[in-house]
Amino acid sequence: MCSICPALSLHSSSASPAASTCTDSASLIASNLSSISPLSTRKNVSFHELSSRSSASMTGGATCSSSSPELPRLCRPLPPPRAPTFVAPCPLTRSSPFPRLPPGGGGGGGAEFLPYYSPPCPPHPHAAFRLEAEPPPPPTPSHHAYRTTYLSARAGAASPGADQGYHTLVAPPPTPWGAPYADSPFDLVPDIVLIDIFSYLTTKELCICARVCRRWHNIAWEPRLWRSVAVSGGDRPLKGLLKRLAGENMVCDAVERVALSGPGLTDKSLHLLARKCPHLSHLRVLGSSGVVNVSNTGVIELVSRCPQLVHLDLAGCISVTCMSAQVPSARQLNIQYLDLTDCVGLTDEGLHTVVQACPGLNFLYLRRCIVISDAGIKYIPSYCAQLRELSVSDCTQVTDFGVYEVAKLGVSLRYLSVAKCDQVSDAGIKQVARNCHRLRYLNSRGCEAVGDVSVTALARSCPRLRALDLGKCDVSNHALKLLARSCPNLKKLSVKSCELVSDEGIREIAFYCRGLQQLNIQDCPGVSLEGYRAVKKYCRRCVIEHTNPGFC
């Protein structure tokens, strides 16, 4: 009896050739089974168990004889084992591969589906996906054009199972940051020329240019370009900017002019300027009620630490009431320009402190400081004898007595505005005309008590007058005739809402003041088309402001 195939023992005694054939077949099966031991080992099935299973299945009626030469299915010789074939992941897309059948095993007894196995990135079997060890250097195309290149494949080599899609396109490596543009005309411009060009840019535009490239970044932060700085948005932007501009000694020596605006501005900005900018000469703070929170503390520290400060604009800082409370009395500030417009908290005592600390003032603007009266105005000529321009517009408590004190400035006064000071009359203006005969500009708009007496005094004493605002004043044609003949260099004139002015007075002004540039005749019922045409005839460059739709 055959120990391998029991079914063969049925004919072993009757037919010896068949027995020898079965013996040969059994030895062939045993050799094939031993050759596939790795597969049986992987499936945890031993050789003896596989032989017993084969014997049990063959006893169910299958026979091996000379008349039936075909062997059962399990008794057929298996093909020699082949190494598993895998599709490695694409080195570019890393797409997951699928297992493939061995060649020639698409369907049949000896083929079986191999499990997925991912080797540690073997070489790709297809030449089209192989990357060379050292790829050639990329071309140098224009930096404004995006080019893609195909991976080179061997001539005649094809990949039947590879996807020739978008993953075969490779972008060139990025250009190193800061590399110059070969086709940029700015590469031919020297740095000194670019610095001159950047000097015309604002602070915001310089910050934008600093982000273009490394070269522009270095040029944009040149200290000489930051002599004038304009910052808006509160304390934080100014802090970051000064930190960037500060050198090794943590001081911004180049900054000379600073303009601050926007909500959120507090005394911290002034403290920062006082510490970082010792050479500060101009400071402008643009604010309004509820937006800027600048007080006396910040102003005092600023003027104390910045001895070169000559221009200070604090318009709209309602919390500022004085400026030199902590400055030693022996020291005087060098401020020449001071604008305290809309500082409604400024009092007569505060004004006294200001003018006492700033004897070199040339320009002082106190518009809408409604608390100031004649008591505070009298300190101005006492300490600021060189004052050239003074504005007390909308200071309703100022009267003729205050104007008398202003007239003591004498020939140094060039500009005076008492607009909407309804308590000022001809007496005060006449005193100014007599003492300040070099006066160039006078604004008495809204002073209804000012009339022909004041205009006559100005015409006789101030022949250098260039601009005069008589809106809502009680003036007539007679005063305009004297003014036109005595002040031929008049450039600007306003007679808005002067009901006594007619075409006769306007014609005299146009005939004698040929260089008139601006004329306001709004709400003047006595001026008709005849007066309008006279101005157009003699003053060709004059801009006429009127409310009559018939003028053309």
Image: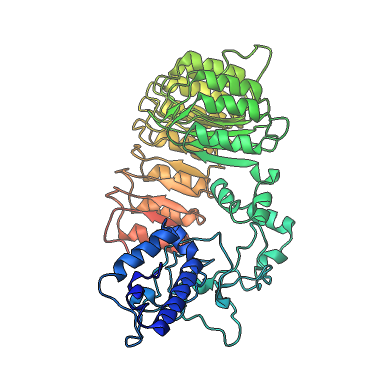
Q: Tell me if residue 388 can be seen.
A: yes
Side of 270 where 19 appears, left or right: left
Front one among 361 and 475: 361
Q: Tell me if residue 87 can be seen.
A: no
Front one among 384 and 333: 333
The part of the image, by quadrant, that contains residue 246 is: top right
Q: Position of residue 413 (x, y in %)?
A: 57, 31
Q: Position of residue 106 (x, y in %)?
A: 39, 79
- Looking at the rendered image, the quarter that the N terminus falls into is bottom left
Q: Residue at x 68, y 55 (%)?
A: 215
Q: Residue at x 53, y 61 (%)?
A: 119
Q: Position of residue 523 (x, y in %)?
A: 29, 47
Q: Position of residue 185 (x, y in %)?
A: 66, 68
Side of 184 where 427 appears, left or right: left
Above or below 19: residue 423 = above
- Looking at the rendered image, the quarter that the C terminus falls into is bottom left
The part of the image, by quadrant, that contains residue 17 is: bottom left
Side of 499 where 540 appears, left or right: right
Number of numbered discs on residues: 0
Front one among 144 and 436: 144
Q: Residue at x 55, y 51 (%)?
A: 208
